[in-house]
Amino acid sequence: MYPRTFHGFNAKVILHGDRVEIRRQLLAKVGGAKDVSLALSDIVKPLSKAPTLMVNGYVYLATDPDPARLSYWADAPRTQIGGARNAILFTWWQRHVQQDFVSAVEEALRSTRPRSL
């Protein structure tokens, strides 16, 4: 089952049993984005917005120290989607990949977290 690979607009994401690796494409690296490895235990939940024909969608892997919300261009770079280190963009044609990725991350989170009584 693991590792599973998903290709987004700005990155390739590899889901392992214990972590998520985000490997940025060259153009994203030129723009300042870096590769990231996140432990599943650090991820609070995946936040996503579906793409439209006009605007890319995203999946943001929220962690405790990260900002609670994301915006497009009007806010500080720390909260912008394009500048967020835990965000992966998806085009309209990649919307099924985005849905599969969100489902896979949610399933991995459920399987790694102990059930509360």
Image (tube, rainbow, N blue to C red):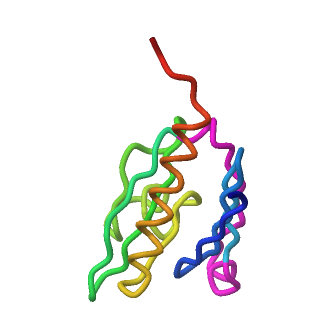
Residue at (58%, 78%) from the top-left corner?
7
The C terminus: image quadrant: top left
Residue at (41%, 66%) from the top-left corner?
99
Q: Is residue 37 magenta?
A: yes
Q: Is residue 42 magenta?
A: yes
Asked where in the image residue 76 lies, by quadrant, the reply is bottom left
50 vs 24, nearest the viewer: 50
In magenta, the rendered stretch is: 25-43
Residue 28 percent coordinates (x, y): 62, 80
96 vs 83, nearest the viewer: 96
Residue 100 percent coordinates (x, y): 47, 66
Residue occupying the far front of the picture: 1
Horizontal relation, residue 12 to residue 88: left or right: right
49 vs 80, nearest the viewer: 49
50 vs 83, nearest the viewer: 50
Measured along the vertical axis of the image, is residue 60 above or below residue 62? below
Asked where in the image residue 114 lies, by quadrant, the reply is top right
Horizontal relation, residue 12 to residue 63: left or right: right
